[in-house]
């Protein structure tokens, strides 16, 4: 804006001070209300570094491909495992009956559901031993089907025994599994259930398909959330809804211990904590600065006016932040208190300019006449 433009603006403010003040107050209040409804708090550490960095991009790709990393984890424990399973069944039924807040739940499965993916659940040492066994048997049976598989199995055993090479983990596994394979084959051909499955190697595997921790004392449920764009955090609706279900069921299950964890729960709790603490700290800072001004200036009206203008300026700043970038991260929240501490300096400077001796201490009508060439419209000389 040119010098002429500033002069015109100054003359307009001098002629319509009440109008300018009213518009400023209205804009500040509207900006504060808008920020309270739209402005988001993002507690993700990715927001501090930026998603364009290589390691952050790899993590986001991993999270997108393996969605289970971003699930609400429900832990169910207690002295009675059977009661914990019944509680999990009841909670899972309630979750599936509420598709508006939850996208699904996983807490139990069976061999027929996993199929060959069962190998993903095996311990590393078991996978290494199975790989060594497959390296011995599979080359002999690549094209011959079941008969070739059994023939290759027997040939490997015979050859190694003849050479005196028996021993080691792979041979021990080969010999130990031989009888089980034949028994399972006999059961399959006769239409009976197979007694042994790869699930026998999974630690703390539950025959009913429930997922337990390695010590077998805590049952786990993975709950997928629905995104709610109307909330401060899009996962908040699901987390609050799940907590409500757990609290409502607590009286009926007094011996069951239930907890919520996982990345969504932690970030929602962090967001709520930061929001509460930042608002509290901002209010305390504003009140504290105003009280200090009251004590320093030994008057009440000027400090209250300075504090009020400062609150409007902070509200306006947050309103602009609601348009761009649309959210605050962990560092930006801290600067709200910094703005209060530094922004009050402008109010002090403006107050001092109207009270100290000299030309700046002129009455508004005199200053308007001197600076803009026209008297204050409210003064008698303007009429």
Image (spheres, rainbow, N blue to C red):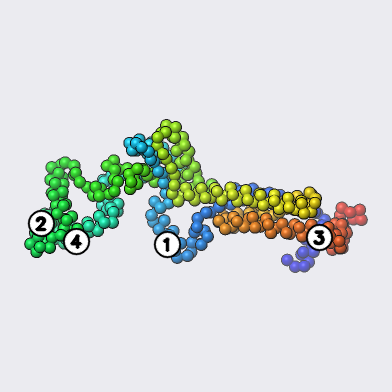
User: Sequence-wise, which precedes: disc 2 or disc 3?
Assistant: 2
Badge 2: few (under 14), some or many (20 or more) residues near its Cα, within 10 Å? Answer: some
Tag 3 and tag 4, C-beta contact below 8 Å: no
> Mark 2 and mark 1: span between their CA atoms?
47 Å
Residue 333 in view (yes/no): yes
Q: Is residue 353 left or right of residue 186?
A: right
Tag 2 and tag 1, C-beta contact below 8 Å: no
Q: Which residue is mark 3?
A: 353
Quadrant in which the N terminus is drawn: bottom right
Q: Which residue is mark 1?
A: 58
User: Sequence-wise, which precedes: disc 4 or disc 1?
Assistant: 1
Element type at mark 1: helix
Q: Which residue is mark 4?
A: 135
Q: Is residue 213 left or right of residue 265?
A: left
Q: Is residue 145 left or right of residue 365?
A: left
Badge 1: few (under 14), some or many (20 or more) residues near its Cα, within 10 Å? Answer: few
Residue at the far top in the pictured view: 252
| Mark in the foreground, 2 or 1 | 2
Badge 3: few (under 14), some or many (20 or more) residues near its Cα, within 10 Å? Answer: some
> Mark 2 and mark 3: span between their CA atoms?
101 Å
Q: Which residue is mark 2?
A: 154
Element type at mark 4: helix
Q: Determine whether 179 is above or below 192 in the image.
A: below
- Please tell me which residue lies in front, 278 or 71: 278
């Amino acid at each position: 804006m040119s010098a002429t433009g500033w002069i015109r603006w100054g003359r307009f403010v001098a002629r319509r001070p009440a109008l300018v003040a009213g518009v400023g107050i209205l804009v500040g209040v509207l900006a504060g209300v808008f920020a309270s409804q739209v402005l988001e708090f993002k507690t993700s550490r990715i927001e501090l570094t930026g998603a364009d960095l290589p390691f952050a991009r790899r993590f986001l790709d991993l999270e997108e491909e393996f969605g289970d990393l971003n699930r609400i984890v429900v832990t169910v424990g207690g002295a009675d495992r059977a009661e914990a399973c019944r509680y999990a069944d009841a909670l899972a039924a309630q979750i599936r009956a509420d598709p508006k807040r939850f996208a699904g739940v996983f807490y139990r499965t069976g061999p027929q559901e996993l199929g060959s993916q069962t190998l993903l659940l095996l311990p590393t040492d078991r996978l290494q031993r199975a790989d060594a066994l497959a390296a011995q048997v599979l080359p002999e049976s690549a094209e011959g089907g079941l008969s070739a598989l059994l023939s290759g199995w027997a040939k490997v055993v015979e050859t190694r025994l003849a050479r005196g090479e028996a021993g080691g983990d792979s041979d021990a596994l080969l010999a130990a599994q031989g009888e089980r394979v034949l028994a399972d084959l006999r059961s399959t051909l006769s239409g009976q259930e197979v007694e042994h499955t790869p699930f026998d190697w999974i630690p703390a595997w539950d025959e009913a398909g429930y997922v337990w921790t390695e010590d077998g004392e805590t049952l786990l449920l993975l709950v997928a959330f629905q995104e709610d764009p109307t909330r401060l955090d899009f996962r908040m609706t699901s987390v609050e809804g799940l907590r409500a279900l757990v609290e409502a069921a607590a009286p009926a299950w007094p011996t069951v211990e239930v907890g919520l964890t996982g990345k969504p729960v932690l970030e929602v709790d962090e967001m709520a904590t930061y929001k509460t603490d930042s608002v509290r700290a901002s209010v305390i800072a504003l009140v504290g600065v105003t009280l200090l001004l009251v004590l320093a200036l030994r008057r009440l009206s000027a400090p209250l006016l300075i504090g009020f203008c400062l609150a409007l300026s902070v509200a306006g700043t947050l309103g602009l932040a609601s348009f761009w970038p649309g959210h605050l991260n962990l560092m930006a929240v801290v600067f709200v208190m910094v703005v209060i501490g530094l922004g009050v300096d402008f109010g002090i400077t403006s107050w001092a300019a109207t009270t100290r001796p000299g030309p700046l201490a002129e009455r508004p009508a005199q200053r308007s006449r001197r600076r803009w060439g026209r008297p204050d419209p409210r003064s008698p000389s303007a009429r």
